[in-house]
Amino acid sequence: GEVVAFAVDGLPYVVDVENSRGGDAVRFSVSRLDDARSIADPATHLTVVKQGRYVGFASQMLGGKMLQARQRTAGGRLCFYNPNFGVNEQWETNDEPEEPDWSSCEMRLKNRRLPSCILRVEVMRVPRSMRDPGDGFHNPATTPRG
């Protein structure tokens, strides 16, 4: 699948293991300006999964756990919990870009389980050169070794 990153006001969303409350759920939240994160950081990368009209977002950094919305909790509204692609992890949008070579676009993503949860984010396509060589998207024959 395609690899993308979400951002709001130029700040990317990141997998936030440090501020998660333990258990299996890992927060996904907007990075702080002083963190200076970019979409080159694997903590921002989401692999797009499609099923019919629904789309999902998996974190390869977390072993393929899927992004889901939760009722507002102290731990945050967005998290990665498990690798299942059920109604909690399904999102719908009417904002998919029509151009095949798009690099970023504004999208509204509505969660299937919690339709009141609508993300308004800039979705940026992560160039192959910025992807983790272990994410399955690099060709070992052409990827330079350091």
Image (tube, rainbow, N blue to C red):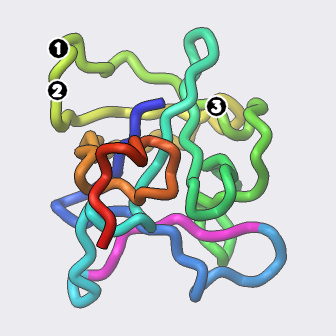
Task: Please give left or right for residue 118 compared with residue 77 in the image.
Answer: left
Q: Position of residue 4 (x, y in %)?
A: 36, 43
Q: Nearer the viewer, mark 2 or mark 3?
A: 2
Q: Amino acid at mark 2?
A: Trp
Which residue is rendered at x = 48% and y = 30% of the image? 1
**Distance between the alpha carbons at the discs numbered 1 and 3:** 23 Å
Tell me which numbered mark, 1 or 3, is placed earlier along the sequence: 3
- In the rendered image, which quarter is residue 120 located in? top left
Q: Amino acid at mark 1?
A: Glu
Task: Please give left or right for residue 123 compared with residue 9 in the image.
Answer: right
Element assignment for label 1: loop
Point out which mark residue 99 bears. 1
Q: Position of residue 111 (x, y in %)?
A: 59, 35
Residue extent of the magenta highlight? 25-32
Q: Which residue is mark 2?
A: 102
Q: Which residue is mark 3?
A: 90
Which residue is rendered at x = 30% and y = 45% of the image? 142
- Viewer-closest of 43 and 139: 139
Residue 116 visible in the shown view: yes
**Which residue of the protein is positioned furthest toward the right in this rendering?**
23
Mark 2–mark 3 contact, CB under 8 Å? Answer: no
Query: Dividing the image into 4 quarters, which one contains the C terminus?
Result: bottom left
Which residue is rendered at x = 66% and y = 77% of the image? 74
How packed mark 3 is, by other alpha carbons closer than 10 Å (few <14, some 14-19, many 20 or more), is many
Mark 1–mark 2 contact, CB under 8 Å? Answer: yes
Q: Position of residue 95 (x, y in %)?
A: 31, 21
**Distance between the alpha carbons at the discs numbered 1 and 2:** 6 Å
- In the rendered image, which quarter is residue 23 located in? bottom right
How packed mark 2 is, by other alpha carbons closer than 10 Å (few <14, some 14-19, many 20 or more), is few
